[in-house]
């Protein structure tokens, strides 16, 4: 399974031309590790991949190209294949967590969520779900929000200020709802695979697993907010007068909108998935303590 599942994913990626060779290699290693560690993890990753691909394709011709696309720094809705940096920035934290779980419990570790009797593996599982929910929520918001709404985004650090589409840190209500939906998709994948993989008698003796859906939705929304705050403060956004596009570098002819030239889009994705992964288990423990 650890060879078959990543191979099928790579075949689909090669057929649809969504990944370049470097990204395919990294994705195969990532899929191998996650499948070996926990089938629930690879199911969640597959759900994120499929949801992100569908969201990118949805009304692609009608999406506005307001953001500058140059070199390897392809943002949402920009043409071109994804490279290994983008794969790592979205799934690298999840891969690291799956390695830790593999070291802690060994391969084929499909166990129900149980903070009381299996704390650390449960913590890692929820952290993984949080990181993937963050990545999926951010992808759906960036790809679908410009299509489903015509409202102008507002800067998350100052909601009274309207900013052009494509500005880092710009949010809309539909975008936040889509972020929660992206998290819910990951939660459904994790929950369904858990029900299928774990013995029924073990599930009966374990705490209820439905809070996974709530946790994942919260993580998708939280991750989007964290991503937007970091983007609005540590990532440069400027309006280029000549092209009318939002750019990520300060230069002549560019009007500053928000942020500082500290992080790029990949770094923001990586940091936001890491923060969400670290915070989500604490929310999970509080929720399971009250169900």
Image: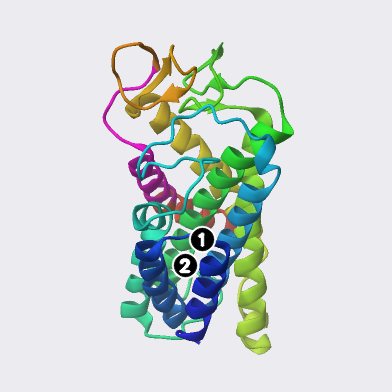
Res 125 label: 2
- Tell me residue 103's x, y (percent): 31, 79
Which residue is drawn at the image coordinates 60% and 41% (left, top)?
A: 143
Tell me the crowding category of disc 2: few under 14, some 14 to 19, or many 20 or more residues within 10 angstroms, Cα based.
many
Q: Can residue 111 be seen from the camera position used here? A: no
Tell whether 37 sits left or right of 286.
left
Which residue is drawn at the image coordinates 43% and 13% (left, top)?
A: 242
Residue interval drawn in magenta: 258-276
- Tell me residue 151's x, y (percent): 69, 21
- Tell me residue 165's x, y (percent): 56, 24
Furthest residue in direction front, as rendered: 242
Callout 2: SS = helix
Q: 199 or 190, which lies in front?
A: 190
Are the residues at dot 2 and dot 1 in contact (C-beta closer than 8 Å)?
yes
**What residue does disc 1 label?**
129
Query: Where 18 sits versus 254, above or below?
Result: below
């Amino acid at each position: 399974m650890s060879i078959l599942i990543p191979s099928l994913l790579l075949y689909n990626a090669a057929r649809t031309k969504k990944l370049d060779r470097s990204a395919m290699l990294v994705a195969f290693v990532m899929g191998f590790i996650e499948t070996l560690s926990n089938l629930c993890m690879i199911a969640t990753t597959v759900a994120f991949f499929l949801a992100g691909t569908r969201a990118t394709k949805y009304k692609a011709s009608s999406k506005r190209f307001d953001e500058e696309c140059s070199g390897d720094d392809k943002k949402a809705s920009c043409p071109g294949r994804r490279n290994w940096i983008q794969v790592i920035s979205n799934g690298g934290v999840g891969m690291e967590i799956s390695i830790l779980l593999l070291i802690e419990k060994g391969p084929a570790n499909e166990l129900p969520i149980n903070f009381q009797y299996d704390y650390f593996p449960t913590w890692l599982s929820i952290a993984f779900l949080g990181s993937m929910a963050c990545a999926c929520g951010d992808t759906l918001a960036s790809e679908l929000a410009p299509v489903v709404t015509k409202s102008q985004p507002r800067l998350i650090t100052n909601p009274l200020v309207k900013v052009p589409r494509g500005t880092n840190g710009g949010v809309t209500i539909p975008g936040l709802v889509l972020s929660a939906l992206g998290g819910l998709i990951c939660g459904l994948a994790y929950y369904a695979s858990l029900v299928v993989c774990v013995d029924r008698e073990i599930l009966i003796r374990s705490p209820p697993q439905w809070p996974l859906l709530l946790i994942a939705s919260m993580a998708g929304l939280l991750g989007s907010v964290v991503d937007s705050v970091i983007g609005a403060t540590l990532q440069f956004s400027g309006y280029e007068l000549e092209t009318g596009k939002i750019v990520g570098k300060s230069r002549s002819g560019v009007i500053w909108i928000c942020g500082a030239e500290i992080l790029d889009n990949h770094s923001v994705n990586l940091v936001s998935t890491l923060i969400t992964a670290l915070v989500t288990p604490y929310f999970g423990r509080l929720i399971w303590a009250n169900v």
